Image (cartoon, rainbow, N blue to C red):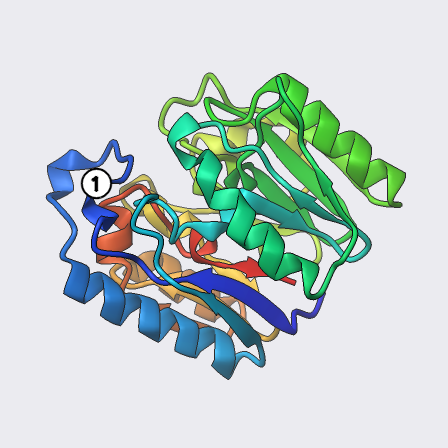
Amino acid sequence: MRFSRAIVRVPGRSYARGLTSSTALGAPVLERALAQHGAYCDALRASGLELTELPADEQHPDGTFVEDTAVVAERVAVVTRPGAASRAGEVGAVAEALRRFRPALESISAPGTVDGGDVCQAGEHFLVGVSARTNEAGAAQLAEILVRHGHTATLVDIRAHRELLHLKSGIAWLGGRSLTVTPGAAALAALADYDRIEVDAAEEYAANCVRVNDTVLVAEGYPRFEARLRQLGYRLHVLDMSEFRKMDGGLSCLSIRF
């Protein structure tokens, strides 16, 4: 699966007012977040992607986490309906940007909710998490849309795994049948047929990595996971994600890749 484009949004001055459960890590420092976001965008460009860069949206502090607002597959693009009510206003600008490349957009409708962070594409197959943010109605709607456009989908209920905000907090697809998984996610029945690269419990945040064409973007500070991927032959681009971790965000959250 090759990507050629991505949509990103720079963090705004209101960024620290966003949703988070990681208060023990302290408040994010905007200057550092901006520098880290810039390095992330540079990594996407170095992997061959052309970026559509949206301006900061001060009315929506979580707006930099654009992945939650859309799911883009080879044959269909779907505007989501985020599970946190405060994020509903983020969708419009992303949909407008997507229409430049995918004029016919499908969408999730009430009472369904879907966060893109709950959707892991593994080739032609999609793993769709049912979580605190993506409800059963929304997951079923998304699966129906994907199947109608020639993809396949499996719903994965992670509601018993309180440590996982989203499905992709605990897994990432690295190509073929390979998934990174946290210890909790490793037990999910829907993942049993995959080759699972388990992340140590002390390095769980590292599981949210992103394969972009020939490179895997990984968070800095997780040496055992990094060494394991290098041993398996992956080419890595290591990025400091400290200011996004403070707001429950990961590498996948910061872009919509297609």
Residue at image location 38% in from the left, 51% down from the top: 250
Query: Is residue 27 in sight in this rendering?
Result: yes
Q: Which one is nearer the viewer's eye here, 241 or 38?
A: 38
Left or right relative to 19: residue 230:
right
Query: Is residue 175 in sight in this rendering?
Result: no
Label 1's element?
Answer: helix
- Residue 73 position, x and y percent, is 73, 53
Q: The N terminus lies in which quarter of the figure?
A: bottom right
Q: Which residue is mark 1?
A: 17
Residue at image location 49% in from the left, 83% down from the top: 46
**Picture quadrant where residue 103 is located:** bottom right
Q: The C terminus lies in which quarter of the figure?
A: bottom right
- Residue 203 position, x and y percent, is 30, 47
Left or right relative to 36: residue 186:
right
**Picture quadrant where residue 74 is located:** bottom right
- Residue 91 position, x and y percent, is 53, 44
Location of residue 25 with respect to 11 vertically, above or below: above
Circle 1 residues within 10 Å: few <14, some 14–19, many ≥20: some
Q: Which one is nearer the viewer's eye here, 199 or 218?
A: 218
Location of residue 21 with respect to 62 vertically, above or below: above
Left or right relative to 46: residue 129:
right
- Residue 152 position, x and y percent, is 81, 39
Residue at image location 27% in from the left, 40% down from the top: 18
> Label 1 amino acid?
Arg
